[in-house]
Image: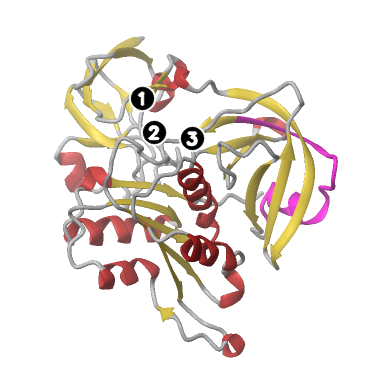
Amino acid sequence: MSYQITVQPSGRSFTAETGETLLDAGLRQGLILPYGCKDGACGACKGKVASGTVDHGKSQAHALTEDEKAAGLTLYCCATAQSDLVIECKQLALASDIPVKTLPSRIEKLDKLAPDVIEMHLRLPASERFQFLAGQYIDFLLKDGKKRSYSLASAPEDDGPLQLQIRHVPGGLFTEQVFSTLKLRDILRFNGPHGSFYLREDSAKPVILLAGGTGFAPVKSIVEHAIAKGMTRPMFIYWGAKARIDLYQHALPEKWAAEHTHIRYVPVLSEPAAGDDWAGRTGFVHQAVLADFADLSAYQVYACGSPLMIDAARRDFVAQGLPEEEFFSDAFTFSTT
């Protein structure tokens, strides 16, 4: 059975089959709703159901509370239609603006940035041009139809290999291969680009970029894109990690800040090691932002890291004045074999 889904305020519509999530139905028909993890964990796809009924599916309690359900909110990546619907989504766009492709790629470089982080460089066929928005991710296509998602660390303007920063997850189906068996010149297939975590270039608001661990990868893409485009919007980069070794490209944002007066970089360690000799900020990275900005009403925030960090940042930033529609996020979730 099919249901008609109307999206306001654009007035666009699409159909959803029984058991098909609203996000999947929209993507299938060339419409892209805001989304991040596609697993009900990050809350990036949260939106209002103005009329009709849905099954909330596997949405996780921290991303969609019972009070939010009662207020008519749902997660588009989990919700399935039980009737015709009218939903509210401010960020609807045509996915066809940038085509989603499935491409082969060859591993050109495996650079160990930290004991548990490898930067992978992928070279595409000479005849292919891969378009994406700074901050988006790709899905590696593995055996048995499994997929693993990783943010692109390179800027769209970079004509070199695609860069990805991959943290080792013990027991991880893909990361175990990256850290043990994959080698230069191996072929990997991927599909993309995906995600609504990208810089909104139609705004002049100053930007706070919040990264936890390898959440630095899409932040790197966004900043390098902004520099390449000559943007001068103030950018405040907050990178949180456990110990000094986990700030695996610390010199790079320091260089951005030194060369561009509109960029500021604040590293934050939650548990500095005994030998780190750390004189910088400590604690939770989002709390460093709260300490520095008493009023967030005039800012945009782009946050990438663990679901717990994303949830805490969204809650506390909104409480400190940030308009909820100006919080953009991508939560990293991990799967093992």
Between marks 3 and 2, how big is the CA–CA gap? 20 Å
Residue 228 position (above or below residue 26):
below
Mark 3 vs mark 2, foreground winner is: 3
**Can residue 275 be seen from the camera position used here?**
yes
Residue 61 position (above or below residue 22):
below
Q: Which residue is drawn at 40% across and 61% down?
A: 261
Disc number at residue 22? 1
Q: Are marks 3 and 2 in contact (CB under 8 Å)?
A: no
Q: Which residue has dot 2 on it? A: 77
Instruction: Say how the picture is coloured.
Output: secondary structure
How many residues crowd around disc 1 within 10 Å: few (fewer than 14), some, or many (20 or more)?
many
Between marks 1 and 2, how big is the CA–CA gap? 6 Å
Q: Do the residues labelled 1 and 2 touch (CB within 8 Å)?
A: yes
How many residues crowd around disc 3 within 10 Å: few (fewer than 14), some, or many (20 or more)?
many
- Sequence-first disc among 1 and 3: 1
Amino acid, disc 3: Leu
The x and y percentages for residue 231 are 40, 45
- Sequence-first disc among 3 and 2: 2
Report the span colored magenta. 171-191
Q: Is residue 188 magenta?
A: yes
Q: Which residue is drawn at 79% across and 43% down?
A: 108
The x and y percentages for residue 327 are 29, 48
Residue 200 position (above or below residue 115):
above
User: Is 254 situated left or right of 3 in this image?
Assistant: right
179 or 289: nearer the viewer: 289
User: Is 191 situated left or right of 220 in this image?
Assistant: right
Q: Which residue has dot 3 on it? A: 133
Amino acid, disc 1: Leu
The x and y percentages for residue 210 are 40, 58
